[in-house]
Amino acid sequence: MAQYDISAKYLLLKHSKALIEYFLGRQNVEILEHLNTDQPTFKSHRGDSTTRIRIDGEEVIVHLEVQSGNSPKPMWARLAAYCGFLISEFQRPVYCIVLYLGPSAGQNDPGYYAYETAEFRYLIQYKVIRLAEIDGQSVLETQAPALLPFTPLMKPPADISAEQWLEKCVASAETAPVEKAVRDDLVATLGIFGALVYDTRLVNQLIKEEIVQKSTFFQEHLERATKRLEETTERLRQEALAQGLEQGLQQGIEQGKAQGVEQERRESAIRHILIVLRTKFSADIVTVLTPAIENISDVEQLEQLLPAAVEAQSLEAFARILHESGS
């Protein structure tokens, strides 16, 4: 799901060294470059992170793939494509890691694919990490801030309840020995991951909404979402002008061409509203409102709902605004 992918990628960019060292099980990693994998020649998963590093004097590429659930396409097949592209592009060794977030995700992933005949042989091997199998208490004891957002997804001690474990994870993030801005990011992303396995009401009780909204993570994500929406609107306006549509988007566009342009604006607005809501609140609860949002045909109404989604203190408050806007 988008909110987990976005959160994981954010952490992997902000805490590259600590996370790569932990997932590789190696020390003295030097980060050289974060590679752009959003190019047309390399269509990777939204939650991936590809980094050029130096370790033990050797330059390598680390490709880390995040999965909240099981991959519809076999993971080895996806990684074969990514690995092949990266080797071709950089002529360097490529270390692939798959990080499974959900408790049942990746249980059938063997971490390799191979075939061999008398004349041909092929092998791709990658590291599989299932958070549900990692001892969470030992991670808390390391006091490594970068790992704290993932701890609710890890295996808790046998002698405490799930609720007590989540409380302990939140408390550890809230008291992490880092700057407040970093601490707020840790708490905000922990809340998003926690909602994958815990009741959203419990997560919301433990994590204050204002911390999430003031976090750099949320602000950067909101800024990107708003920018994409503005860019989409401007692109469509330019296309309309290029086609000689005199009245433009604001005054309405001739029937036929107008329908396609308006539909793209509408879909973009809906997509960004849902991204904001899923980032702030539980994806499962947001699903209840999704049909009502998707049924809105008025583009301006949708675009007015985006700032309302940003400012809403609770999903119930946004639901009231949604209801009032349609009445």
Image: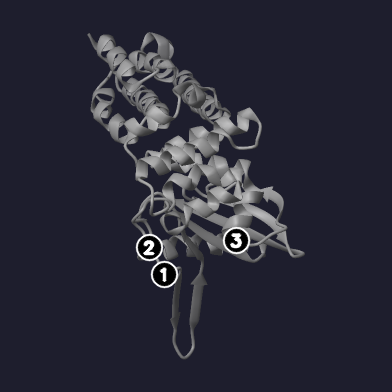
Q: Position of residue 123 (x, y in %)?
A: 50, 75
Q: Quadrant of the N terminus?
A: top left
Q: How is the image coloured?
A: one colour
Residue wearing tag 3: 24
Q: Quadrant of residue 14?
A: top right
Q: In front of the other: label 2 or label 3? A: 3
In the image, residue 113 above or below residue 40: below
Query: Residue 74 — which label?
Result: 2
- Amino acid type of disc 2? Pro
Within-10-Å neighbours for mark 3: few <14, some 14–19, many 20+: some
> Could you tell me which secondary element the residue under label 3 belongs to?
helix
In the image, residue 83 above or below residue 241: below
- Amino acid type of disc 3? Leu
**Do the numbered discs 3 and 1 sit on residues whose CB atoms are within 8 Å?**
no
Query: Residue 110 — which label?
Result: 1
> Could you tell me which secondary element the residue under label 2 belongs to?
loop
Of mark 3 and mark 1, the one earlier in the sequence is: 3
Question: Which residue sits at x=50%, y=51%?
Answer: 137
- The residue most toward the bottom is 118
- Amino acid type of disc 1? Pro
Of mark 1 and mark 2, the one earlier in the sequence is: 2
